Amino acid sequence: MAKGEIGWTRKTADGERVFVYVHMVGENWKFYFRKSRNERWTRLETPPLEDWIELYHCMQKLVARKRAEPAILVKLRKRIRELFPDAEI
């Protein structure tokens, strides 16, 4: 992953481990995933709510360390509410 990208590991419903990374391009967030280190990154067109929530938590940590602006949390929260109106953040 390059500088400015955020990544984590999660498990799918099948129990498989998936690597996820995200970077911001303009006002849009681009999500990518792969199942093993040997695979190429694949664009995730419609990321699940759990990935958006994980991104939000990662950005909270960056804001706390003063590595990101607090306004980004507002934009991210707004985007999550647009995509998932019933989600609690």
Image: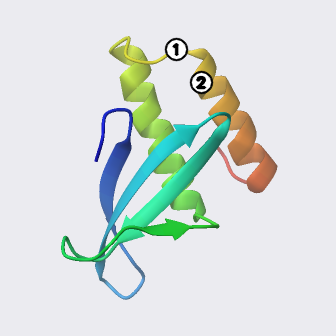
Q: Name the residue under label 2.
A: 72
Query: How crowded is the residue under tag 1: few (<14 C-alpha within 10 Å), some, or many (20+)?
Result: some
Q: What residue type is labelled 2?
A: Ile
Residue plotted at (37% across, 88% down)? 14
Q: At which x and y percent is residue 73?
A: 59, 26
Q: What residue type is labelled 1?
A: Glu
Q: Which of 59 and 15 is in front in this view?
A: 59
Q: Which residue is drawn at 54% across and 67% down?
A: 44
Residue 85 appears anywhere in the view: no
Kindly identify which residue carries mark 1.
Answer: 69
- Residue 21 x %, y %: 39, 53
Does residue 59 appear in this view? yes
**Residue 46 location (% of width, % of height):** 64, 67
Q: Residue furthest left?
A: 38
Q: Is residue 26 left or right of residue 32?
A: right
Which image quadrant for residue 19? bottom left
Q: Which element type, helix, strand or loop, lies under badge 1?
A: loop
Circle 2 — which element? helix
Q: Are marks 1 and 2 in contact (CB under 8 Å)?
A: yes
